[in-house]
Image: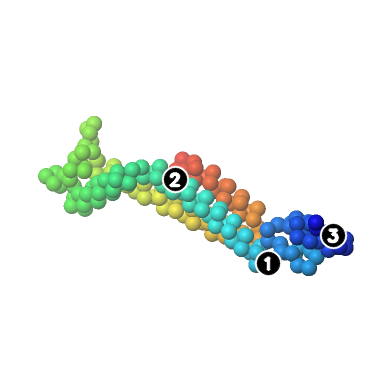
Amino acid sequence: MKVIQELHQYEDGLRPPAPSSAHIWMGDTWVLCEENAAEQLHQEAERLCTRVDAAADHARRTLAGDPLRALEYQQAALEAQAFKDQGYPKKAVPLSVSAWIVKGRTARQAADQILAKAAEFDANLVALRELRLKAKAQIRAHMAKGKADLAAQVADDVLVTIRAFPLQI
C-alpha cells in the first residue's frame, strides 16, 4: 500500500503526470530538462524532414516512371545531343532518334523534341530537389529556435506543393 506521507511528497505511481516527456522528476516536482526538450525538437525535425523526403521521392518516381525507362530516355537524349552536335547528318540518324520520327517529324525535329523533353525533365528534378532541400533547412531552422508550430507549417505547405508537383512548377 502506498501512502502520501505529506501533501507535497509523492511515492512512485502517485506523483502527478509529467507535463511532457521532456520533464524529469526532481525532488517533489517536475522540471523541464533542456537536453530532453532539445532532443525531442531534433527528433521532430527529422520526422518532418523524413515526410518531406518521402513525398519528394514519390513525386520523383512519378516524374521518372520506371527506372529502366528513365535510363532509356537518358540514352535517347545523349544520342539526340550527339546527333545535333554533328549537325543532324541525314545518313547517321541514331536509332533512338529515328524511333521518334512519326507523324511527319523530321530527324532534326525528333532530336530537338527529345532534347526539349529531357531538359524539361531535368528542370523538374532540379526544382523538386530545391523545394525539398529548402523546406528541410527551414524546418530545422524553426526547430532550432523552438518554433515547432512554424516547422510543422512549413512541412504541411511543402507537402501540398510536392503532391501537386509538377503541375505548379
Figure check: 86 above or below 63: below
Q: Are marks 2 and 1 in contact (CB under 8 Å)?
A: no
Figure check: 140 above or below 168: below
x and y percentages locating residue 157 in the rendered image = 57, 47
Q: Amino acid at mark 1?
A: Glu
Residue placed under numbered mark 2 in the picture: 58
Of the pair 76 and 68, the residue shown nearer to us: 68
State which tag comes first along the sequence, 1 or 3: 3
> Judging from the image, what secondary structure is the residue with disc 3 in?
loop
Q: Residue at x 19, y 40 (%)?
A: 98
- In whole angstroms, how far apart are the C-alphas of marks 2 and 1? 36 Å
Residue placed under numbered mark 3 in the picture: 4
Horizontally, residue 106 falls left or right of residue 10, namely: left
Residue 58: tell me if it is visible: yes
> Judging from the image, what secondary structure is the residue with disc 1 in?
helix
Q: Amino acid at mark 2?
A: His
State which tag comes first along the sequence, 2 or 1: 1
Of the pair 76 and 16, the residue shown nearer to us: 16
| Quadrant (top left, top right, bottom left, bottom right) of the N terminus | bottom right
Of the pair 9 and 62, the residue shown nearer to us: 9
Q: Residue at x 65, y 58 (%)?
A: 147
State which tag comes first along the sequence, 3 or 2: 3
Label 1 Cα crowd, 10 Å radius (few <14 / some 14-19 / many 20+) = few
Q: Amino acid at mark 3?
A: Ile
Horizontally, residue 152 falls left or right of residue 122, namely: right
Q: Which mark is residue 34?
A: 1
